[in-house]
Image (cartoon, rainbow, N blue to C red):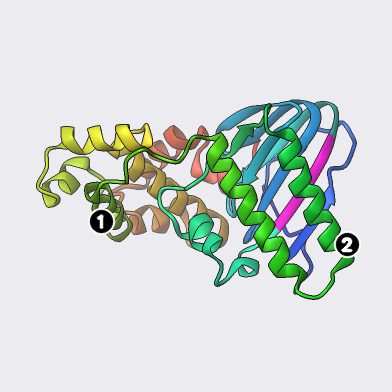
Amino acid sequence: MQIEIKNKLNEKELFRIKRMKEVIKTTHPHGHKEYLEIIYLTQGEGMHQIDHHRFPVSGNSLYLVMPGQIHNWELTAIPRGFVVMVQKDFLLGHPLYDTLFQTFPLAFSSGYRLENAGPAFMGIFESIENEYAARQSNYEAVVQTYLLLLFNLLKREAHMERSQPEPPLLKSFFEMVAAHYKTMHEVAWYSGELNVTPKTLNANCRKFLDKTAGAVINEKLTAESKRLLLYSQANLGEIAYELGFTDPSHFNKFFKRQTGVLPSVYRRGIS
């Protein structure tokens, strides 16, 4: 079975909102090419897997499936809620474009429980639905404003506003990872270039990201691995060498450790 890369939007369609199909279903792992899917459920039960993360399905839950991510449903009760599809180009020139599609590490996680904020999020999705249905003048800008509100509320729910600004050390580290992750995989190299010890770099990453510096590098490598596996014609050996692995077997081990499946399985299907 192939991993399907779905495109539910028409060729020139940049945005859509619809109600979640109210059916109990189990879906095959699939991805969405070049668009973000935002799913808000007011009720439902089961599991929702996004890449290698498994989230329990419940009411007042929200999920983000980024371009290139693989997800599938194992629903055991009828779901109700909304599905929003946002092509990258819909947000060109908007502050959310960089936040969602250009920020490294990813600004938002994949799953949220919104137990105490259900009415606020329900109101946003209903307002977006109304704007999309009426399509009055400038409705796209109004929808973008609602999306900005939605993600600002997500920040609040996730306690993403930090009491201290991100230190210059981490900003420099992120810039270096973005520039050198294909050739340099070791924390010690980055810490040396930044004139700090690996312990100091790791401590800063743990404090502000709740993950190690090595995890940051691996996430960048994994994201690019998925992009190449899904959208390029390069074979596995070529991808391995492009990403700085001296042997394809090393790439296989790295990818399986990060995702739970081999690169060939990720590209061709789940057996």
Q: Earlier in the sequence, mark 1 or mark 2?
A: 2
Q: Could you tell me which residue is drawn at 53 percent across and 42 percent down?
A: 155
Which residue sits at x=70%, y=38%? 72
* Helix, strand or loop under label 2: helix
Which amino acid type is marked by label 1? Met
x, y percentage for residue 38? 69, 48
Residue 37: tell me if it is visible: yes
Q: Relative to residue 198, is residue 241 drawn left or right?
A: right
Q: Which residue is drawn at the image coordinates 40% and 52% (left, top)?
A: 104
Q: Relative to residue 203, is residue 226 depicted above or below?
A: below
Which residue position is annotated with label 1? Answer: 176
Q: Is residue 81 covered in magenta?
A: yes
Could you say which disc has been placed on residue 133 in the image? 2
Highlighted magenta segment, given as a residue range: 80-85
The structure residue drawn at horizontal position 72% and vertical position 41%, both measured from the top left corner, is 121
Pick the residue in front: 90 or 217. Answer: 90
Mark 1 falls on what kind of element?
Answer: helix
